[in-house]
Image: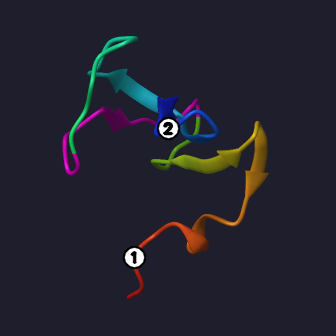
Amino acid sequence: VIKHSQTLLSVYAHNSKIIVTEGQSVSKGQKIAEVGNSDSDIAKLHFEIRNMGKPVDPLKFLPSR
C-alpha cells in the first residue's frame, strides 16, 4: 500500500518480493515490488486506487495513453 495523500492510496497485490519498507518515502518510477504469480502459472498484478478507503476507477489517476 502506498499512501499518496491523507485520502488517496494505491494498492498492489500478488507480489513475489516487496522492495520498500513501511514508512519509507518512494519516488515516481521507483521499483517497489516484483510481480508474483500467487500460486498460478502466470504472473499477475492486482492494482487498485482507493479514495477515502473505497476503490475508484484508476484511469482517472493514471496518465492518458
Local crowd size for mark 2, using a 10 Å CA cut-off: few (<14), some (14–19), many (≥20): some
* Secondary structure type for disc 2: loop
Local crowd size for mark 1, using a 10 Å CA cut-off: few (<14), some (14–19), many (≥20): few
Which residue carries the number 1 mark?
63
Amino acid type at circle 2 is: Asn
Give x and y (percent) for residue 10: 54, 42
Task: Tell me what residue is drawn at x 25 percent, y 32 percent.
Answer: 26
Indicate yes or no whether the magenta region holds residue 45.
no
Quadrant hosting residue 40: top right
- In the rendering, which numbered label is found on residue 23? none
Task: Tell me what residue is drawn at x 53 percent, y 34 percent.
Answer: 14
- In the rendering, which numbered label is found on residue 37? 2
Quadrant hosting residue 30: top left
Indicate yes or no whether the magenta region holds residue 35.
yes
Task: Tell me what residue is drawn at x 23 percent, y 49 percent.
Answer: 28
Query: Start and end of the magenta stretch?
Result: 28-39
Main SS, magenta region, reads loop
Query: How many numbered dots are placed on residues in this image?
Result: 2
